[in-house]
Image (spheres, rainbow, N blue to C red):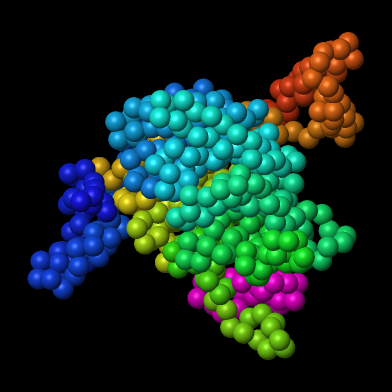
Amino acid sequence: MRRPWKHPAPAAAAIAGRHGAADLCLREVGDLLPRSFARRAAGSEDLVMRLQLHRKLERHTGCVNTVGFNDAGDTLISGSDDQMVMLWDWATGANKLEFHSGHGGNVFQARFMPGTDDRTIVTCGADGEVRLAKIQDGGDVSTTLLGEHEGRAHNVAVEPGSPYIFYSCGEDGLVQHFDLRTNTATKLLLCRSSVRKSGFSCVHLNAIAIDPRNPNLFAVGGSNAYARVYDIRKHKWDGSSDFGHPSDCYCPSHLVDDKHVGITGLAFSHLSELLVSYNEENIYLFPKNGGLGSDPKSSIKIGVNEGCKSTMAASGQDIAQPAPQVYVGHRNRETVKRVTFIGPNDEYVASGSDCGRIFIWRKRDGRFLRAMEGDECVVNCIEPHPHDMTIASSGIDNDVKMWTPSAIERAPVVNVEELRPRKRRAKLWHFDLPELLIRHLLASQRRQQSAEEEDSSEDLEDRLDSTGLLNLVLRAADRGLSSADDEESSDGSEECSLN
C-alpha cells in the first residue's frame, strides 16, 4: 500500500513539532486515524522549515517555464524555451523521456491528463497553439494541434480527475474548452474589461484555474485587476446564450480602479478559496463568498486591513464580507509568475520572485516563513508534490530544482536585513522603444505572418529589414540598461522586502 506521504529520515523528527507528539499518542490509542495523522504530519510547519535543495534536473537548454507532477507524484514534467518537453524520475534525477513539443515557440505549460497512465499530455505556448501529445508503447510521441489563440497562450487548466476535459486561455482574451473524446475546441468566451459588450477592450489572460471542490467553476485573470469566476453550467453549447458574464469577481478594494496592475497567477484551495497574485503588488487570498458580485462596478469600497470587515451593495442591502488575507515581501514585476498552495491541506502559500527566491507564507495568517535561493535571476514556477512536502521550482535558469524537507536543522527565521539585493540581469524591456520603431516592428511582423511559405525576393527583404530592426533594438537596449539599473538600484522598494 502506498503511503500518502514519505520523507527522508531527518524529517521524521519533524513530527514532534507543534501538536506532533500529541497526535502520535492519539494515533497509538486509536483516537486519530492513521490517514488523518499522516496528513497532519505531512503539513507540519517544521517540514517547511527543513526544506532544502534535493537535486537539480539539468537537460533543458532554455528557461524552464512549466513544471508539474503526475498523480502518483513519482514523475515530473517540464517544458522550456527550447520547445522540448521532458519527463523525469525526480527522485533519482533520471531523464525518462524527452520530445519536441511541436510548438514553434516557448512551451509555457505542460500537464498530464489524469487517468491516462501518464501517456496523454497537453501543452500551450508562445506560438498561441494548444497541443496534444500521445506517448506510444515504444516511447515514440505524436503531437497534434487542438486549438489556437491569437498571441501567446499562457495557461491550461485540467479538470480534476478527468482524462478528457481541460481549458486554455491566452493573450487574445479567449477561453477555450477542450474535450479529448472528440479532439474539439469550443470557444467559451472572450474576457472583456467590463461585463458589457461594447466599448471595452479584451483582457489579455495570463492564468486560469478550476475549483477542485466544484469543477463547474473556473477563474481567469490577466491584464486588469479583477479575477473573474465563471460557471460552465451556464454555457449553452448551441451558442444560444451569452456566456461572457461572470458569476463573481474578486479584487482588493484599493485596486478596484487601478488600471496599472494585472494578475499573473491564480489558484483554488480545496475549500474553494481563491488565491490571486498581482504584478507590482501583493498576493491575496479571498474566501469562497468574498467576491464583489457579477458586476464589480456595483460594489462600494471595501476595507483590506487584516481583521476588518467589508461591505458591498447587493439588492439594496449591505452584506458584511471578510477582507482578503494578504501575503507580502516578494517582488512580481519582470515575468508572469504563478502562485500555489503547498501542504496536504493547503496550509501554506508559495510564490517565486524577481529576486530569485522562493517565498513561503503560512496561509491562515500571512506569516512569512521562508525565502530560499531558487534561481540566479527569477523564479517563475513552483509546483507542490501531490502527497508530501516536496516542491519543484523553475525560472530563468535552464534547470528544475527539487526541494525536500531533508535538512537536519531548521532554517533560521529570516528578517528583512537578510534579504540582500540580488544582482540584476540585463532586461530588454528596461527601456522605452520609440513609437516609430514599434510601428515598424509590428508592420514587419504582420508582413511575415501574411507571407507565403515559399521564398521570394520580397520575403528576403522583409527578413533583412527585421534583422536590421532587431540590431537597432539591441543597440538601444545596451544604451538603456545601465541607466535603468542605476535608477532601479536607488529605489529600495523594488527589492524583495518584508513589511
Q: Is residue 321 magenta?
A: no
Task: Report which quarter residue 366 is drawn in.
Answer: bottom left
x then y, percent, for residue 21: 15, 64
Q: Residue furthest front?
A: 182
Q: Which residues are magenta?
A: 291-310
Residue 424 seen by the camera: no
Q: Nearer the viewer, residue 491 or 279?
A: 279
Drawn side of residue 36 relative to residue 376, left or right: left
Q: Residue furthest left?
A: 29
Q: Is residue 279 above or below residue 110?
A: below
Drawn side of residue 138 relative to residue 197, left or right: left
Q: Residue at 75%, 61% (x, y): give it.
A: 239
Q: Residue at 67%, 74% (x, y): give it.
A: 293
Task: Report which quarter residue 232 is drawn in.
Answer: bottom right
Q: Is residue 298 magenta?
A: yes
x then y, percent, for residue 83: 57, 27
x then y, percent, for residue 386: 37, 50
Magenta stretch: dominant secondary structure: loop
Q: Is residue 237 above or below residue 52?
A: below
Q: Residue furthest bottom?
A: 317
Number of dots carrying numbers: 0
Residue 103 seen by the camera: yes
Q: Nearer the viewer, residue 52 or 276?
A: 276
Q: Residue at 15%, 67% (x, y): give it.
A: 27
Q: Residue at 58%, 83% (x, y): give it.
A: 320
